[in-house]
Amino acid sequence: MTVLRSVLYMPSSNERALEKAKTIAADAIIFDLEDAVAPDAKEAARGNALAAVQSNDYGHKTLTIRCNGLDTPWGAEDLAAAAAVHPHAIVVPKVSGPEHLTQIVALTGQTPIWAMVETPAALFAIREICSFPQVSALVMGTNDLVKELRAAMVPGRAPLLPHLALALAGARLAGKTILDGVWNDVKDLDGFRAECQQGFELGFDGKTLIHPTQVEPCNEVWAPSEDEIAHARKVIDAFAEAEADGRGVVTVDGRMVENLHRDIALRILATAEAIAAR
């Protein structure tokens, strides 16, 4: 299992930031060539990102590169250059549907793609995007989605919840990873933690981040607690004992549990083990 609790955007034009990222406890890094990079720094940023992916200096982190769109002067070269250094994935902004992805893979081949869901077009094509062979994950681009929908950006994200749920359903139907969008106020860690908790409860696998201070609380929210791990073990042991005795009903802590609870328990333990292995 690959753990992707905390996925940190890092502007690839900022060499100090790239150096600092080596020591940050994020599960994954997105070396950004798009929004965080000024036009006159695009080519230098590309070179920095390619060097970072090839450096072996980032430990067990999942390393990805977010390229510029094909409708920009840099997009096609970004995609081809990124694929050549074999990152764990290439992050593609504003994916609109399978036709768009076909254009992308003509340049990236079999390199896994993280498709960003940022537009109404992506929401209406979510099943096709999720089932596209090279797509291994969805990334919610909530800032752009709010803009495109003319929605309000409010605490609790009520205007976005139907769209987040739709993307989640598509990802789960296809068995793909899905990452929640960013929290913009880097000084409001209480608000950030609350949104992490909401994303976890909705079913996201992790969250994209814009600042190193967000990594620790994000990792904490998406990591099983000691109590959750202990309960998961009890559920698994109870099912094993019941099967050995030929019993069809299992009770744990006074509550009847089913196969689905065992499946959840197995996932909790697998997640805990994957985190510990890092």
Image (spheres, rainbow, N blue to C red):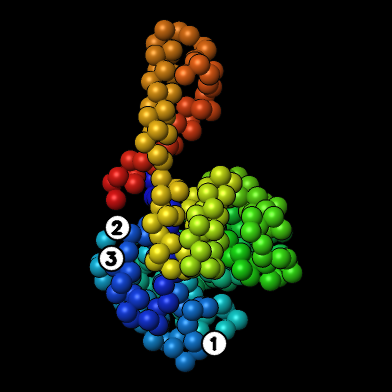
Circle 1 SS class? loop
Q: Amino acid at mark 2?
A: His
The nearer-to-camera label among 1 and 3 is 3
Sequence-first disc among 1 and 3? 3
Q: Which mark is residue 60?
A: 2
Residue 205 can be seen, yes or no? yes
Circle 3 SS class? loop
Q: Identify the image quadrant of the N terminus.
A: top left
Work out whether residue 38 or residue 225 is closer to the camera in this orientation and state it. 225
Q: Residue at x 29, y 51 (%)?
A: 278
| C-alpha gap between disc 1 and disc 2 | 33 Å
Q: Which mark is residue 73?
A: 1
The nearer-to-camera label among 3 and 2 is 3
The total number of labels drawn is 3
Q: Residue at x 40, y 60 (%)?
A: 215
- Check the image and report above or below for 98 versus 246: below
| C-alpha gap between disc 1 and disc 3 | 33 Å
Q: Amino acid at mark 3?
A: Thr
> Which x, y percent locates residue 245?
41, 7
Sequence-first disc among 3 and 2? 3
> Is mark 3 in CB contact (under 8 Å) with mark 2?
no
Work out whether residue 93 or residue 197 is closer to the camera in this orientation and state it. 197
- Check the image and report above or below for 155 versus 49: above
Q: Amino acid at mark 1?
A: Pro
Left or right, 186 with respect to 215, comes to right
Q: Residue at x 61, y 68 (%)?
A: 143
Circle 2 SS class? loop
Q: Which mark is residue 23?
A: 3
> Is mark 1 in CB contact (under 8 Å) with mark 2?
no
The nearer-to-camera label among 1 and 2 is 2
- Quarter occupied by residue 70: bottom right
- Quarter occupied by residue 157: bottom right
